[in-house]
Image (spheres, rainbow, N blue to C red):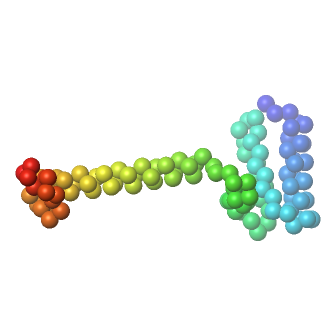
């Protein structure tokens, strides 16, 4: 259970984030997860949290793990698709459906 002081501090932090954004025209994104798993967030007016996170990633050279995972999955899918196409071509050659791309070694084998 959270204490009243944690709630006050969180409120103070959100207030300061708003002040920075409004008084100084700073781009502010603040995300707080409480010990009770509640999420509190603040984002500058005319901005989105996604825009702020993207700006952070560009400025710091940081990549978020989710993007790395998506890129890895895409590379793996591309690799599997290429291998699948090669296997299909081989099957067409072996069944005699497509002999146009048959190599000399394979044609001697058949």
Foreground pick, 50 / 33? 50
Up/down of 29 relative to 4, above or below:
below
Residue plotted at (64% across, 51% down): 63
- Residue 31 percent coordinates (x, y): 76, 49
Image quadrant occupied by the N terminus: top right
- Tell me the quarter of the picture where residue 98 sits: bottom left
Q: Is residue 53 left or right of residue 96?
A: right
Residue plotted at (34% across, 54% down): 81
Up/down of 56 relative to 8, above or below:
below
- Tell me the quarter of the picture where residue 103 sits: bottom left
The answer to whether one can see residue 95 in this image is no
- Residue 46 percent coordinates (x, y): 76, 69
Q: Is residue 81 left or right of residue 55?
A: left
Foreground pick, 78 / 14? 78
- Residue 73 percent coordinates (x, y): 46, 49
Up/down of 93 relative to 37, above or below:
below
Residue plotted at (53% across, 47% down): 69
Foreground pick, 6 / 79? 79
């Amino acid at each position: 259970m959270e204490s009243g002081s944690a709630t006050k501090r969180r409120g103070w932090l959100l207030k300061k984030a708003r002040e920075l954004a409004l008084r100084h025209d700073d781009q502010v994104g603040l995300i707080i997860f409480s010990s009770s798993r509640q999420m509190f967030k603040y984002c500058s007016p005319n901005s989105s949290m996604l825009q702020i996170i993207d700006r952070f990633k560009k400025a710091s050279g940081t990549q978020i793990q989710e993007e790395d995972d998506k890129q890895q999955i895409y590379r793996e899918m591309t690799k599997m698709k290429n291998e699948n196409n090669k296997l299909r071509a081989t099957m067409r050659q072996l069944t005699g459906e497509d002999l146009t791309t048959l190599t000399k070694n394979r044609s001697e084998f058949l």
